[in-house]
Amino acid sequence: MAQSGVCPDAAVVSRVSVDHVTKSYGRLMALSDVSLSVRPGEVLGLIGPNGAGKTTLFECIAGVLPCETGTISVEGRRISPKERSAFIFYMPDGIAPWPSQPLRWALDFTLGFFGGPPARRDEVIAQLGLEPLLASPMGTLSKGQRKRAVLAIGMLTPHPLFLVDEPFDGLDLRQTREVAAAIRAHAARGRTVFLSIHQIADASRVCDRFVLISGGRVAAEGTLEELIARARAVPSYPSPPSYPSSLEDAFLALT
């Protein structure tokens, strides 16, 4: 997770630009000339299959992983990996922080350590259905319970940009819809949320805009309507005029 040290103006939501990011592992090119923008106050979805480079890109944006080329900028000013920890809170997939501590302790520690909004604690607990789990040690939670618990931890941090890797993994349909609603409500308060998602149906439920990534390259970026319009212009999808008509259709047409 991100570190403490939130800058004085961290509450200001700003435009973030990712420009020409490249990352390789030996001969494997994980990211190739990736560029995208994150707009203030939106829920942006990074959409792609497993292995597309989503997690690598998030780690590069958060400053966890160095990249060979490229820059991350906030309102046109390039920020170093060290500076990013004051602006970005990154929640990786599959983590189990403080396994011996109860969830209640983890939430309270997060608020105290990062200086988040204490008034939001009970609201976040209610939105994510965590009240019955507050006394449970983090390490005893199921995959779906832990996913909601760590999402609550991230929601109680004050960083303007919140990156979440696979927020719906391990959740059933009802839980997915509840978590999606909680994320939408969280963003409505003014926080910018960037989600990495491989399930397209989940992404279309929660995101304002989408970045389609495949094979380490960005194939397209835009709202659902913009992506569908681009997909309809692809020669391999000449008819009928109403096709593609969904995010899934657009992804298949553009990647």
Image (cartoon, helix red, strand yellow):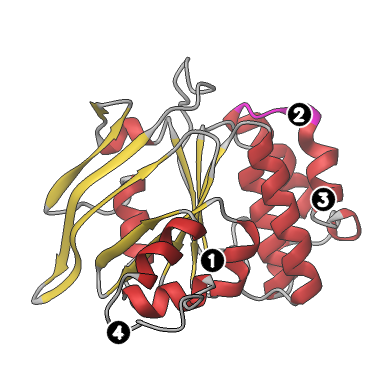
Question: What label does residue 127 carry, if any?
Answer: 3
Q: Earlier in the sequence, mark 4 or mark 3?
A: 3
Residue 250 can be seen, yes or no: yes
For the residues labelled 3 and 2, the Cα–Cα distance comes to 15 Å
Say how many tags the image has: 4
Measured as percent of width and height from the top left, residue 183 is found at 67, 50
Measured as percent of width and height from the top left, residue 167 is found at 59, 63
Q: Quadrant of residue 19?
A: top left
Residue identified by numbered label 4: 236
Determine contact: label 4, label 3, CB under 8 Å: no
For the residues labelled 4 and 3, the Cα–Cα distance comes to 43 Å
Residue type indicated by callout 1 = Glu
Main secondary structure of the magenta stretch: loop
- Left or right: 157, with 223 as reference point: right
* Mark 1 residue element: loop
Q: Nearer the viewer, mark 3 or mark 2?
A: 3
Determine contact: label 2, label 1, CB under 8 Å: no
Determine contact: label 4, label 1, CB under 8 Å: no
In this picture, which residue range is highlighted in magenta? 115-119
Q: Nearer the viewer, mark 4 or mark 2?
A: 4
Q: Nearer the viewer, residue 216 or 206?
A: 206
Residue identified by numbered label 2: 118
Compared to residue 109, the image places residue 130 above or below, namely: below
Q: Quadrant of residue 217?
A: bottom left
Q: Is residue 226 magenta?
A: no
Residue identified by numbered label 1: 166
Residue 49 can be seen, yes or no: no
